[in-house]
Amino acid sequence: MAFLRAFLGWELFLEESFVLFLAGQKPPRGRPPYRHTFPPDLEKAREWVVPEGRPYAKWSIAAEVANRAERHFRSGGPFASVLRANQNTLEDARFIRNAIAHDSASAFARFEMVVRTTLLTLPPKLTVGGFLSTTKPATTPPISFLEFYIGRIDFAARQIIQT
């Protein structure tokens, strides 16, 4: 559940920081990103990020958020470069999140793909929790996959707000 909460926090962070920057809010340090669009208020900014034909904007897919950032900010603002640089890790995290949140064969198959890619094997009867508590190979000091993914999400968030 800690991983699920961390990933949900990441999605909320992306949405809130994106909308605030779009509305002209400054980051803690430096200048706000150069905007291509200028919504009159926060409510309009929230509406403008929703793709046409959808009831809401998705924040879990790094490539979609990077593309959205390029439409609203010069060079994608602080989002596009950070999301693209961390895209593989963020996609893996999304697949792990989906395996926790959805009881479906396709979600678990994608999770198994992440496990095979990172561990080079699929241990028998491996659960998502078991994987997240496993020590990530070649890390010094040794850290679990849970610590690794949460650390990478935290690092990406810090890069976004320290523009």
Image: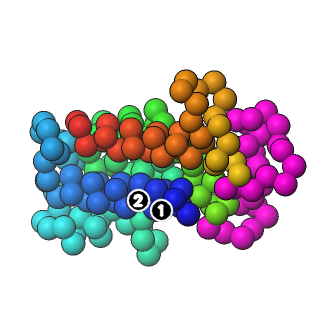
Whether residue 51 is visible to the viewer of this picture, yes or no, is: no
Q: CA distance from mark 1 to mark 2?
A: 6 Å
The quadrant holding residue 120 is top right
**Between residues 95 and 9, which one lies in front from this camera angle?**
9
**Residue at position x 51%, y 53% in the image:** 61
Q: Quadrant of the C terminus?
A: top left
Q: With respect to residue 133, does 7 lie above or below?
A: below
Q: Is disc 2 placed on a helix, strand or loop?
A: helix
Q: Picture coordinates of residue 104 (x, y %)?
A: 74, 68
Q: Picture coordinates of residue 125 (x, y %)?
A: 84, 54
User: Which residue is the extreme one toward the right?
Assistant: 124
**Residue at position x 67%, y 42% in the image:** 134
Q: Which residues are magenta?
A: 101-129
Q: Is disc 1 placed on a helix, strand or loop?
A: helix
| Residue topped by disc 2 | 9
| Residue topped by disc 1 | 5
**Residue neighbourhood size for the residue with mark 2, other residues' Cα within 10 Å, grouped as few (<14), some (14–19), many (≥20):** few
Q: Picture coordinates of residue 82 (x, y %)?
A: 39, 37
Q: Quadrant of the N terminus?
A: bottom right
Position of 160 compared to 136: left or right? left
Whether residue 44 is visible to the viewer of this picture, yes or no, is: yes
Position of 102 compared to 79: left or right? right
**Residue neighbourhood size for the residue with mark 1, other residues' Cα within 10 Å, grouped as few (<14), some (14–19), many (≥20):** few
Magenta: predominant secondary structure element?
A: helix
Q: With respect to residue 55, does 37 lie above or below?
A: above
The residue type indicated by label 1 comes to Arg
Position of 70 compared to 101: left or right? left
Q: Are marks 1 and 2 in contact (CB under 8 Å)?
A: yes
**Residue at position x 21%, y 57% in the image:** 20
The residue type indicated by label 2 comes to Gly
As for residue 141 lying within the magenta part, the answer is no
Q: Picture coordinates of residue 14 (x, y %)?
A: 36, 54
